[in-house]
Image (tube, helix red, strand yellow):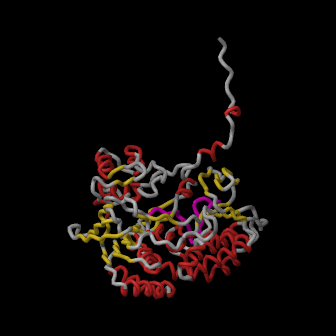
Amino acid sequence: MSSPDFSPVTVIGGGIAGATSAIALSRHGFPVTLIDEQPAAGGQIFRAPSPYARQTVRPNHEFSGGDALRQKLAASPVDVRFSTRVWGLSPTLTLDLIGPDGIDQLPPSTVVVANGATERFLPFQGWTTPRLTGLAGASILMRNGGTLPGQTVVVAGSGPLLFSVAHQVLELGGKVAAIVDAGHRSDWLRLGAMLSLDPARLTQATSWMLRLRKAGIPIHHRAHISAAQETETGLLLTVSEIDHPERRHVYAADAAACGYGLKPSTLITRTAGVQHRHDPVGGYLEPVTDVAGRTSRSDLYVTGDAAGIRGMAVARLRGLITAHAIAQDRGVISPQTYETLTRAPLRQLRRLEAVSRRMLPLMNAGSAIPAHLQDETIVCRCERVKAATLRSAVEAGAEDLNQLKAWTRCGMGPCQGRMCEDSARGLLTAACGNTPEEAGSFTARMPFFPLPLTAVTGTFAYSDIPLPKAAPL
C-alpha cells in the first residue's frame, strides 16, 4: 500500500458544505485553506447577521446554526481567508485571488469547489426599475440586515424561497401585497406529501403557510409579474397568468422581490474543464459528479449546491462525504473506514435526496416565461440587449448561446451572463427548436468579475515606468 498523501487541499466557499468539508479534511490531517468572499463563514443560509439584525430579527435556527458552524471552524486548524474571491484559475488549478491585501495566487492543489448557487432571474417589462430586488437579496437584507426592502412588498417567482421571503416580511412588521408563484398549486400539495421524509422541512413549511394564510395574503399560482412601472409612491405591478395572459391583476407596492429558483455556480468548474450536463428537472447546467463529489478531473471535487441544488441538509452531508472521499483517494483512510464513516450520512442523503428532487420542478416552474417576452423587454441588463435583438439574431441563423453572444453582446457584461443566460437560452430554444444542451452555455471568461485597476497595476509613480530610448536623429 502506498504511503498517505497529505498534500494541501483548497476549499472554495465557506457555506455549510465548504466549511463542513474543510473541518472534516483538517481532522483527517490535511493542511486546508478555506477561501470565502464573505467576512465570515456561513454562506447564504448561515450568513453572519449584523449586530442590528440580532436585535431586530427573532432568534432562529439560521442564527444558531451559523454561530455553531463558525465556532467549529475557528476551533479547527483550517487556514481561513475571508473577504477573498477567486477571480481566475489556470489549467493546473493555480488559483488567482483578490483579498484585503490585493492580488495573490495559490499554487496547484486538490480543489474542493463549494461556492454554492446563483439566483435565477427571468426578465419582464420594467424589471430594471429601482425598488426591484431578487428573492435572495431581499432575504439577506431582512435576515442578515434586519431591514425591510419596503413596507409593502409583492413577492414573486418560484420555489420555497418565495414563501420564506414572504414570511420574513411579516416577521419584520411589513405587509405582503401578494404572492405570485409560477408553479402549480397541485405541485405544492404533492411536495407536502413527500415532506413526511423530512420532518424538519415539513414543520417549517406548515408554520409558514399557516402564518401566510392567517394574514389573508392573495396567492396567485401559475402566474408571474409581467410589467413593473415606477410611480411617485412606489411601484405599480401587473401580474399575469402564465397559461392565460389576458387574465391580469394589478398591485401597488413599495418594492418587489422576484427570483426563479437557484442554479449551481459553474464559472469555476467550466473554466477548469470539468464535464457538465443539463439537468432537465432543475433546468440548469451542473457538473457531473459521483455521490462523493468526484468530477472528470481527479484533482477537483464539487460539493454542496455547486453540484446541484438540494438544500441545506443535503449540502452538509455532501461536504462531509466529500472530505472522507478525498481521505480515501489519498490513501489516508482505507475503503473499509470510508464505508464506516459514510454509511449513516449516505443513508440520510438518499432519504433527503427524494424530497430535494421533488422541489426542483417548483424552482424551474417559470421556464416557459422567456419564450413569451415582449420584444421591448431588456434581457441582458448589462449590455441593454432586448428580446427583439435576440430574436433577430436567431432568425439570422444563431443556433447556440455563444453565437447569440457574439452577434448581440448578450452576456458580455460584468455579470458574464449570470442574470441573462437562462432567459437567452429559453428564448433561443423556443425560437429555433433546439434543446437546452444544443443551445449550450456562455463560455466562461477570466476574470470572473470586474477587478479594480489599482489591484492589477499596484502603486507606482510615473518615474517608475521604463521608457525606451529616443530614436537617433
Looking at the figure, which quarter contains the N terminus?
A: bottom right
Identify the magenta region: 284-300
The residue drawn where x is 55% and y is 49% is 446
- Choose between 455 and 222: the one closer to the eye: 455
Position of residue 330 relative to residue 53, above or below, is above
Q: Is residue 358 visible?
A: no
Q: Against 213, is 463 above or below?
A: above
Residue projecting furthest to the front: 232
Viewer-side residue, 330 vs 430: 430
In the image, residue 183 above or below residue 90? below
Task: Tell me the residue at 61%/64% (across/down).
Answer: 38
Residue closest to the far top: 473
Asked whether residue 455 is drawn in magenta, I would say: no
Q: Quadrant of residue 109?
A: bottom right
The spot of residue 105 in percent (x, y) is: 68, 52
Which x, y percent locates residue 184?
32, 76
Task: Report the quarter where the C terminus lies.
Answer: top right
Q: Quadrant of residue 268?
A: bottom right
The residue at the point 30 percent across, 62 percent down is 227
Residue 2 place in picture, x, y as percent: 77, 65
> Residue 4 at what x, y percent from top left?
77, 67
